Amino acid sequence: MIAVYVTGTDTGIGKTLASCALLHALRGRGLRAVGMKPVASGCAWIDGGWKNEDALALQAAGTPGATYADLNPFALEHPLAPELAARDSGTEVTLEPILAACARLAAHADALVAEGVGGWSAPLSRTLMQADLVRALKLPVVLVVGLRLGCLSHALLSARTILADGLPLAGWIASHVDPAMQRVEDNLTMLRQRLPAPCWGVLPHAQHPDPVQLASRLQIPFLAE
């Protein structure tokens, strides 16, 4: 089964857009691809349950059939760091429900794209980091780099930490979040020279980006003919 864990250099830098584009790219190759948002903070009460906008986007981008409960085992109401949001909800993020939900999704899919929460080092609970979750899921990591001032440091620190945590960095995707950013191509060149993984694609800035169209901008190495 093809599976990756998508993390980012920060929150709000295009992880969901990149994850949805990956799902469409995988589905475009005839694969049954499903998304997953193991932990989401910042939810609205919809149809009798807490649901997250990003998780719903993943559900829409993936092959139909995945239940929301499996796609987003921990849907936390408040838009806070997961540890704080879970505490406000009277719960604690733990591995077992996520692993069980992932197994159910994988049983009916050829590919899985799991999207993380915030940046790589955002804690999930007092005792659980995202590295612990990804290690338990046994997934390689794809880093989404938000193209804006400071991205070089954020990207290199994130990649260094992912590798130091003992996880494989399969690749990275650039997401052009700041249309006013200067010297974009120079920054991309420096990122390509320094990040210890291949670039899977660059997502241009758009007011209303379409992940279906952006799928064609991605080059996923293990799908190369």
Image (spheres, helix red, strand yellow):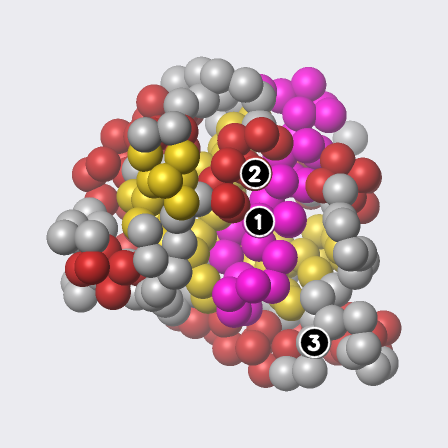
Q: CA distance from mark 3 to mark 2?
A: 24 Å
Q: Mark 2 or mark 1: which comes first in sequence?
A: 1
- Which span is picked out in magenta? 6-32
Evaluate if marks 2 and 1 touch, with contact meaning CB atoms under 8 Å apart.
Answer: yes
- Left or right of 92 on screen, residue 16: right
Looking at the picture, how far across and down is residue 211, in whole percent?
A: 72, 41
Report helix, strand or loop for mark 2: helix
Asked if one can make out residue 17 in the rendered structure from this viewpoint, the answer is yes
Closer to the observer: label 3 or label 2? Answer: 2
- Residue 75 position in % (x across, y down): 33, 44
Foreground pick, 84 / 150: 84
Query: Residue at label 2?
Result: 57
Residue identified by numbered label 1: 16
Q: Which mark is residue 199?
A: none
The residue under label 3 is 148
Going by the numbered disc 2, the residue's amino acid type is Ala
Mark 3 or mark 2: whose residue is earlier in sequence: 2
Instruction: Judge by depth and name the residue closer to the eye, 119 or 92.
Output: 92
Secondary structure beneath label 3: loop
Q: Position of residue 63 (x, y in %)?
A: 57, 21
Identify the residue at horizontal 38%, vertical 68% (top origin). 121
Question: Identity of the amino acid at label 3?
Answer: Arg
**Mark 2 nearby-residue class (10 Å; few <14, some 14–19, many ≥20):** some
x then y, percent, for residue 120: 43, 64
Name the residue: 63% across, 83% down: 150
In front: label 2 or label 1: 2
Badge 1 marks a residue whose secondary structure is helix
Is 223 situated above or below 207?
above
Q: Work out whether residue 134 can be spotted.
A: no
Asked whether the beta carbons under mark 3 and mark 2 sit within 8 Å of each other, the answer is no
Q: Name which residue lies at 66% across and 25% down.
A: 27
